[in-house]
């Protein structure tokens, strides 16, 4: 009898433990077809949009991502930080990201944010979406 009880206890422990990094999401989850973009607006001190020469995002200070430049309004100073396409790089509890913007080969924007995700989409946890650079 002891062996049977021991076998069930050990089996339960193996079944109930999740491996690190395993998704808590059900395989058959139904998500909306909405594609989420987290963006920032960059303005100068006078409220005019800043047209950056280049921009990219660092995720956890080690992974640089450059986002698709189509479908964004750079002339209005609106830039993507991360999208649902980058969801695999984002942790459920939150990931530190830094949006970097360049003008004339120099970093003029280094803006930290915290982005998390649920089973379907990314979401902004911390950080402003409007950046005002007085000196530009």
Image (cartoon, helix red, strand yellow):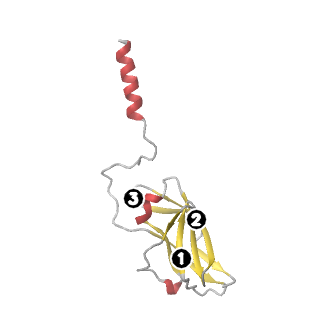
Q: Work out whether 116 lies above or below 76.
A: above
> Is 132 in front, or is 104?
104
- Residue name at image x 42 percent, y 46 percent: 22
Direction top: furthest residue: 1
Give the mark toward the camera: 2 or 3. 2
Identify the element where label 1 is drawn.
strand
Direction front: furthest residue: 105
Q: Earlier in the sequence, mark 1 or mark 2?
A: 1
Identify the element where label 2 is drawn.
strand
Residue count near mark 1 (Cα–Cα under 10 Å), binned few <14, some 14–19, many ≥20: many
Distance between the Cα atoms at labels 1 and 2?
A: 15 Å
Direction right: furthest residue: 135
Answer with the quarter of the image where residue 67 lies. Answer: bottom left
Q: Work out whether 103 lies above or below 16.
A: below
Identify the element where label 3 is drawn.
loop
Distance between the Cα atoms at labels 1 and 3?
A: 26 Å
Using residue 103 as the reference point, say whether residue 116 is left or right of it.
left
- Residue name at image x 52 percent, y 72 percent: 56
Give the mark toward the camera: 1 or 3. 1
Answer with the quarter of the image where residue 87 lies. Answer: bottom left
In this figure, which residue is indicated by the disc labeled 2?
Answer: 113
Residue 2 pos. (x, y %): 38, 13
In this figure, which residue is indicated by the disc labeled 1?
Answer: 55
Answer with the quarter of the image where residue 114 lies. Answer: bottom right
Residue 104 pos. (x, y %): 60, 85
Which quarter of the rendered picture does the N terminus lie within? Answer: top left
Give the mark toward the camera: 1 or 2. 1
Which quarter of the rendered picture does the C terminus lie within? Answer: bottom right
In this figure, which residue is indicated by the disc labeled 3?
Answer: 120
């Amino acid at each position: 009898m002891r062996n049977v009880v021991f076998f069930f206890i050990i089996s339960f422990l193996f079944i109930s433990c999740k491996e690190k990094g395993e998704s808590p999401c059900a395989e058959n989850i139904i998500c909306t077809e909405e594609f989420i973009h987290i963006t920032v607006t960059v303005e100068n001190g006078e409220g005019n949009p800043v047209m950056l020469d280049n921009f990219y995002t660092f995720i956890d200070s080690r992974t640089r991502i450059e986002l698709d430049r189509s479908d964004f309004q750079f002339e209005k100073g609106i830039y993507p930080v991360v999208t649902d396409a980058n969801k695999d790089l984002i942790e459920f509890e939150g990931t530190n990201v830094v949006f970097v913007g360049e003008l004339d080969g120099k970093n003029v924007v280094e803006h930290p944010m915290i982005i998390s995700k649920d089973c379907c989409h990314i979401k902004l946890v911390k950080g402003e979406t409007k950046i005002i650079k007085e000196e530009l």
